[in-house]
Amino acid sequence: MGRATFSGSSTLHSSPNTTSRSPATRSRWAGPPATHKTDMVTVAPGEAIDVLMVADAPPAHYHMIALANQPPEPDPQIPVFTSRGLIRYAGAATDNNGLPVPMPIMPNQHNTMPSYYFHANLTGLAHPERHRVPMHVDERLFVTLGLGSICRGRNTTCKRRRSPETIVVATMNNVSFAHPKTTALLERYYDGTSKGVYTEDFPVRPPRPFNYTNRALIPPGPLEEELEPTFKATKLKRFKYNTSVEIVFQSTTLMQSDSNPMHLHGYDVFLLAQGLGNFNPKTDTRKFNYHNPQLRNTVQVPRGGWAAVRFLTDNPGMWYLHCHFEFHIIMGMATAFIVEDGPTPETSLPPPPPEFRRCGANGLSQP
């Protein structure tokens, strides 16, 4: 039995998932969730998966294959390349006894269901000393993930449908995050000088409900044009210390239908459930796993589906929430959560060290 770590890579950003398989082994997930037997592992950007490989095949040479996948057309298509490594059993003949090296059968690059089933079937370790799922909820957020467009330059009106007059951006609840270029958000928050830098009105739901997974929204057209206009802004969300927060992330089909690996800095979150289609609060909450959910800091929101998480805001500071697609971050699929100080020095944000350099209009300044 051997141990291996698979990590999601931004170089495979043509797809949110990389699928790895080898006929030489059987794998057991050995990370935070409970043991899960599988012959295939799918990894999203931002994820690292530890597996124990049971080497019980006849001694020989075997290929291990990694394949990125992506949604089918009409989503934009990016070239997909297959990576492979070689597993050699001790004692196997150098020339593999003249036999061809077996290649595992991989799913089609457009088949995203293996990733969905792999992630959805994982559970956590039910242990009395582990953190327990908050059973009450103080604040709920419903966050849609998709693409939108803004007018170029200072224009306030422009033609839509991917015209040269617009720029495509990534959004959360129709807001595309504007990253400050000359200052640090945490520094401004700590100093109490946030005016003109950010606001604390990140929307807790989309501006209007619609059929979020309607594939007719992918190609440009009148229906998509009505829903996708957005704007750039540095909008944050503030929470009091020790608040129980539930977030339902909903992937949409606005101009694309990719899945989204959402990563929250500073926290691990309980992944209560995942599903396909539009989230239904009346029926889908019955699927929530309160006994042994996964505890993660990156959650794969499935293509054309949703993921529900819950966590307790017990780590004060300012924490970045973003899609782990590098190009989605740059395009604005992000925000930040402010968590206020708790009642004690141990539960409060410490001051920066004396030698810490501050941000200024001309870059870093001396302490």
Image (tube, rainbow, N blue to C red):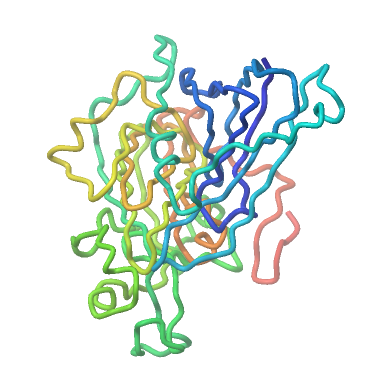
Q: Which x, y percent locates residue 26?
A: 57, 22
Q: Residue furthest right?
A: 94
Quarter assignment of residue 284: top left
Q: What is the residue that sits farthest to the front in this orientation? A: 98
User: Going 62% across and 53% down the picture, which residue do you hit?
Assistant: 10
Rendered position, 108 above or below 286 = below
Say which quadrant the C terminus sits in: bottom right
Q: Which residue is at 65% across, 26% downward?
A: 24
**Whole-percent x, y for residue 317 in the image:** 49, 43
Q: Relative to 84, say whether 312 is above or below.
A: above
Residue 128 vs 349, above or below: the answer is above
Look at the image and tell me whether residue 120 can be seen.
Answer: yes
Answer left or right for 98 relative to 274: right
**Residue 333, x across and y down, in percent:** 44, 60
Q: Does residue 180 appear to the left or right of 114 in the view shown?
A: right
| Viewer-side residue, 167 vs 103 | 103
Viewer-closest of 21 and 130: 21
